[in-house]
Image (spheres, rainbow, N blue to C red):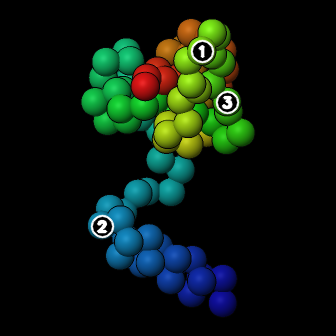
């Protein structure tokens, strides 16, 4: 029963995304923010992250939420707010 459920979930994921990710696949690590912003223009954040702002600027809210991807690129989070390479 569990195998059928897992197989059905894998087929559904492939049908939705068109990409079959192997189990336990590591999140991609980007060399720098320029490279990451090509794929994710507003950055990548972990779940529950909020952009730190000062003055009258508005916080970035349209970043990609993906904790595994954020953890793989944590070095690019200069202000330690949980969002790597945030950009308006």
Question: What residue is disc 2 on?
Answer: 18
- The disc placed on residue 39 is none
Question: What residue is disc 1 on?
Answer: 56
| Closer to the camera in the image, 27 or 39 | 39
Q: Earlier in the sequence, mark 1 or mark 2?
A: 2
In this image, 50 relative to 33: left or right? right
At x 53%, y 29%, the residue is 60
At x 66%, y 82%, the residue is 2
Residue contact at pointers 1 and 2, CB within 8 angstroms = no
Q: Position of residue 68 (x, y in %)?
A: 57, 39
Q: CA distance from mark 1 to mark 3?
A: 16 Å
User: Callout 1: helix, strand or loop?
Assistant: loop
Residue contact at pointers 1 and 3, CB within 8 angstroms = no
Give the number of the mark in front: 1 or 2.
1
Few, some or many residues within 10 Å of mark 3 (<14, 14–19, 20+): some
The answer to whether one can see residue 83 in this image is no
Q: Earlier in the sequence, mark 2 or mark 3?
A: 2
Question: What residue is disc 3 on?
Answer: 50
Q: Position of residue 33 (x, y in %)?
A: 38, 18
| Closer to the camera in the image, 42 or 70 | 42
Q: Quadrant of residue 28?
A: top left
Q: Check the image and name the residue furthest to the right.
A: 48
At x 44%, y 70%, the residue is 13
């Amino acid at each position: 029963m569990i195998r059928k459920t897992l197989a059905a979930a894998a087929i559904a994921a492939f049908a939705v995304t068109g990409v079959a990710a192997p189990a336990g696949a590591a999140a991609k690590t980007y060399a720098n923010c320029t490279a990451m912003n090509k794929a994710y223009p507003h950055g990548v954040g972990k779940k529950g992250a909020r952009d730190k702002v000062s003055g009258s600027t508005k916080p970035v809210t349209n970043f990609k939420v993906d904790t595994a991807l954020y953890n793989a690129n944590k070095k690019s989070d200069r202000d330690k707010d949980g969002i790597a390479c945030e950009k308006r």
